[in-house]
Amino acid sequence: MQELRALAARAENKRTETGIPRIAMVQGEIPEHLLTAVYAPMVNLILTGSKTMTVGDRTLRYDPATYFVMSVDLPAIGSVHPSATGEPYLAVSMTLDPVIVAALIRDLPTAVCSTLFASGFSVAPVTGELLDAWIRMLRLMDRSDEIAVLAPAYEREILFRVLQGPLGWMLRDIASPDTALARIGVAINWIRHNFTEQIRVDVLAEMAALSVSAFHRHFKAVTALSPLQYQKRIRLLHARSQLIAGQGSATSIAFSVGYESPNQFSREYARLFGLPPSRDLLKATQELRGG
């Protein structure tokens, strides 16, 4: 862990690219509004400090020497904390590529079991073998001429170690189009790209090849949200991003993300983020300026 922490300690106070495909790192205090986002499928390893992630009505805490897997795009509210002795939060992540995961699974001698309609995010303790693979990967930051040859091998090793662990079924479901998770993922992908439109749950259920009642039940199991709640979170996250980027007034942004009533938008915004749009913008501006 010490070598891995030393390698990742060059990260900035934001998502920091490493020069290695799909590998990023972050450390220190991160403004809350930057941690409230739609998270792409990933493997994230916590090195120091801790992180909490809330999706719908589920909250998980990640501590050092644990990793979490997110298997679908999920709108989450996150917060990071330094260690009890004051070391800053530090983590590394790998964005998951279903094509690479599928190729690895095809090469495995035995199948990885799938779990029917379980959560789309979970946490597990790290192993020594997984840490070793991460160390070799991050060492490539100082050996850029070796990245093209060795990074793909180390990526496969990290994925292989995750596949061997308690969350291996999540990777299997990401890469297999006929699994339950993949079927829910079709509906999630549609909502992500059409969040401004009115959604019909019966149409989404048909996309997932499920009855309406089964679709509701399994969508909630995967995302901790109903389809309508998921859409609302996506709308509000996009609205907050636009607001903080100065891309319009609260009213114009409300209409742009699909709301018909600015008052309803303001109420739901405050319910999710704790403050109405104008005050939340002021808070985010102060955070970006360092208080």
Image: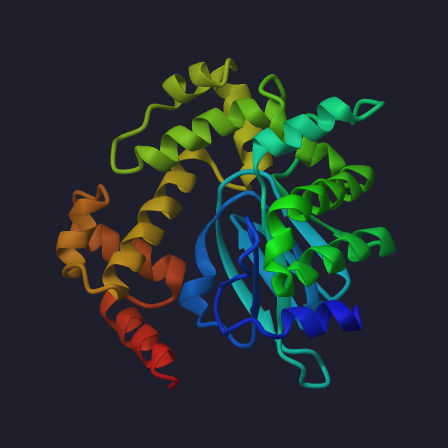
Residue 194 or 138: which is nearer the viewer? Answer: 138
Q: Is residue 100 left or right of residue 250?
A: right
In the rendered image, the vertical position of residue 4 relative to residue 173, given as above or below: below
Question: Horizontal and vertical percent for residue 200?
Answer: 33, 23
Left or right of 142? Residue 55 is: left
Q: Is residue 99 above or below residue 34?
A: above
- Can you say which quadrant of the picture contains the C terminus? bottom left
Q: Measured along the vertical axis of the image, is residue 245 above or below residue 265?
A: below
- The residue sitting at 55% across, 49% down in the picture is 21
Colour scheme shown: rainbow
- In this rendering, the count of numbered labels is 0
Q: Residue at x 71, y 40 (%)?
A: 156
Where is residue 254? Give x, y as percent. 20, 51
Could you tell me if residue 117 is visible in this image?
no
Quadrant assignment, res 44: bottom right
Is residue 254 something that shows in the picture?
yes
Can you say whether 130 is above or below 217 in the image? Answer: below
Q: Position of residue 275 (x, y in %)?
A: 33, 68
Closest to the observer, 182 or 45: 45
Q: Position of residue 30 (x, y in %)?
A: 49, 72
At a point 63% along the width and 38% down the height, the residue shown is 119
Quadrant location of the N terminus?
bottom right
Left or right, residue 46 beside residue 3? left
Q: Residue at x 55, y 55 (%)?
A: 54
**Quarter where residue 10 is shown:** bottom right
